[in-house]
Image: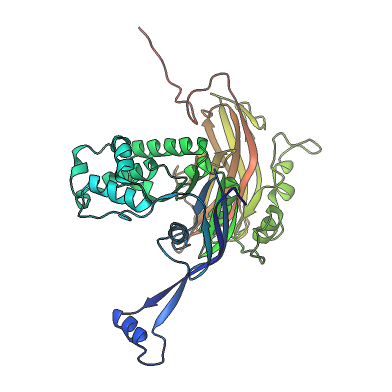
């Protein structure tokens, strides 16, 4: 199709790993019949279609193949098998140092990079001022880049990447080494690029940025594409992967849908249908808050959240809280087994899946005690509502540590809707409740 910017078809990448350098030489020369290497499959049959103008994020644990697929797309590394088609001029900011000569100064490296991409010296001359202005590293631009700090280096590298008029911008985690002001500057540039219809592909562990900027997210794990889709859904499943609770689908063509995920991860039990808010209301009364009929839950179920609700400052169970007022998040937890020190938590996200705030009993030093099987705990979080007006999603969890390993006992993602009613909104996610005095 004409609107496809990047097409990856059944790409595999296999690296040969040797115990010592001499094994590589012996195998290459054909001495002996035994194989001297082990194979590491960095990518396993990955398919990916990125359309022009899309901003696509790639997430996954360390070693999942994120950087490898970017290197293959940019041509830095060749795939072992499969095909990659790219339609458009690529500008890539990969790991620190890629494409730079450490002995050259900043100016020389600007011309080196521009020439490699295909620009003439005259074209680079025309872009030089814009590059230097964005990098903002002063006289250091005349010093060898081997003397740069990591922050200065990424400033120059990103300035070059975005100012050579790319049709496709690829960024691999490099922004994480810049200071917060430079990162904000870069993400503002992302927004400009999106408005211009350019294609952006980036790898990041910053899930808030992934959620905010991406139209689509690709989730990789151990070289396999677990799925792709709307950022919030992919981020929720990624969190399951992080704690070893994700159930790999039998079919590699797609992710499990939400119902299959609930059945597989929770043994067919749904808190919303069995032990959720419906049980907190009076008999015969309708629930007072808006439950999510498609909530995602998982965990070992050594502890189970059996009841939950939000209440306003008058104790009324509700999904609507007035900004500036106190409110309560409550959950009841039943212990199926002995647990050394359960941690009770809540998180509030916006509708795009960005985590806005949250806390737990460990952070608050509120409960650090063992519990016995059969016991119940009623957990209440009371706080002032300072979020801006709008709709949010509440997630609840019970976790803990077993022999220093983090364990999820029960998590309910996006279990309740929370609406903040406000007649005064300020800038950003929450109100600092400033006291203003003008004389």
Count of marks overlaid on the render:
0
State which quarter of the image contains the C terminus.
top left
Is residue 142 rendered to the left or right of residue 302? Answer: left
Q: Pick out the residue farthest to the right.
A: 284
Q: Is residue 428 above or below residue 11?
A: above
Residue 393 place in picture, x, y as percent:
60, 39
Residue nearer the viewer, 265 or 103: 103
Residue nearer the viewer, 347 or 85: 85
Residue 152 place in picture, x, y as percent:
26, 44
Quarter where residue 245 is shown: bottom right
Which residue shows up at 33% across the image and 38% down it?
A: 127
Q: Pick out the residue farthest to the top.
A: 439
Is residue 267 rendered to the left or right of residue 395? Answer: right
Q: Pick out the residue farthest to the bottom.
A: 32
Q: Is residue 67 above or below residue 54?
A: below
Residue 138 place in picture, x, y as percent:
22, 37
Quarter where residue 137 is shown: top left
Q: How is the image coloured?
A: rainbow
Residue nearer the viewer, 295 or 209: 209
Q: Is residue 329 above or below residue 367?
A: above
Residue 267 place in picture, x, y as percent:
69, 61
Is there any visible trace of residue 177 in the rendered image?
Answer: yes
Is there any visible trace of residue 377 in the rendered image?
Answer: no
Is residue 431 rendered to the left or right of residue 98? Answer: right
Residue nearer the viewer, 283 or 317: 317
């Amino acid at each position: 199709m004409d609107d496809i910017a990047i097409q990856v078809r059944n790409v595999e990448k296999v690296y040969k790993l040797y115990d010592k350098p001499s094994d590589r030489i012996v195998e290459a020369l054909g001495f002996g019949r035994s194989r001297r290497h082990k194979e590491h499959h960095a990518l396993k049959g990955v398919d990916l279609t990125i359309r022009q103008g899309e901003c696509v994020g790639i997430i996954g644990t360390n070693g999942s193949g994120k950087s490898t697929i970017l290197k293959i797309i940019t041509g830095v590394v060749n795939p072992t098998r499969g095909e990659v088609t790219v339609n458009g001029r690529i500008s890539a900011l990969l790991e620190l140092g890629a494409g730079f000569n450490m002995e050259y100064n900043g100016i020389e490296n600007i011309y080196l990079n521009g020439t490699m991409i295909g620009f003439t010296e005259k074209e680079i001359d025309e872009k030089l001022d814009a590059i230097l202005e964005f990098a903002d590293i002063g006289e250091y631009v005349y010093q060898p880049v081997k003397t740069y700090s990591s922050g200065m280096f990424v400033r120059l590298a990103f300035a070059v990447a975005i100012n050579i008029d790319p049709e496709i911008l690829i960024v691999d985690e490099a922004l994480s080494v810049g200071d917060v002001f430079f990162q904000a500057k870069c993400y503002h540039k992302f927004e400009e690029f999106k408005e211009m219809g350019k294609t952006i592909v980036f790898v990041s562990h910053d899930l808030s940025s992934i959620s905010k900027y991406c139209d689509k997210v690709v989730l990789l794990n151990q070289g396999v594409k677990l799925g792709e889709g709307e950022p919030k859904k992919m981020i929720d499943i990624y969190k399951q992967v992080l704690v070893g609770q994700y159930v790999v689908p039998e079919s590699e063509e797609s992710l499990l849908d939400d119902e299959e995920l609930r059945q597989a991860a929770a043994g067919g039990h749904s808190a919303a249908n069995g032990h959720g808010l419906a049980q907190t209301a009076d008999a015969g009364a309708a629930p007072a808050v808006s439950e999510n009929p498609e909530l995602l839950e998982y965990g070992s179920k050594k502890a189970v959240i059996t009841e939950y609700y939000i209440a306003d400052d008058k104790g009324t169970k509700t999904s609507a809280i007035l900004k500036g007022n106190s409110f309560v998040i409550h959950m009841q937890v039943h212990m199926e087994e002995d647990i050394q020190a359960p941690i009770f938590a809540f998180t509030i996200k916006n509708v795009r899946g960005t985590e806005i705030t949250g806390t737990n009993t460990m952070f608050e030093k509120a409960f650090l005690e063992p519990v016995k099987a059969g016991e119940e705990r009623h957990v209440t979080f009371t706080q002032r509502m300072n979020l801006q007006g709008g709709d949010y999603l509440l997630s609840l969890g019970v976790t803990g540590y077993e022999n220093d390993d983090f364990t999820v006992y029960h998590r309910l993602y996006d279990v309740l809707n929370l609406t903040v009613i406000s007649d005064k909104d300020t800038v950003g996610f929450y109100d600092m409740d400033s006291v203003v005095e003008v004389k």
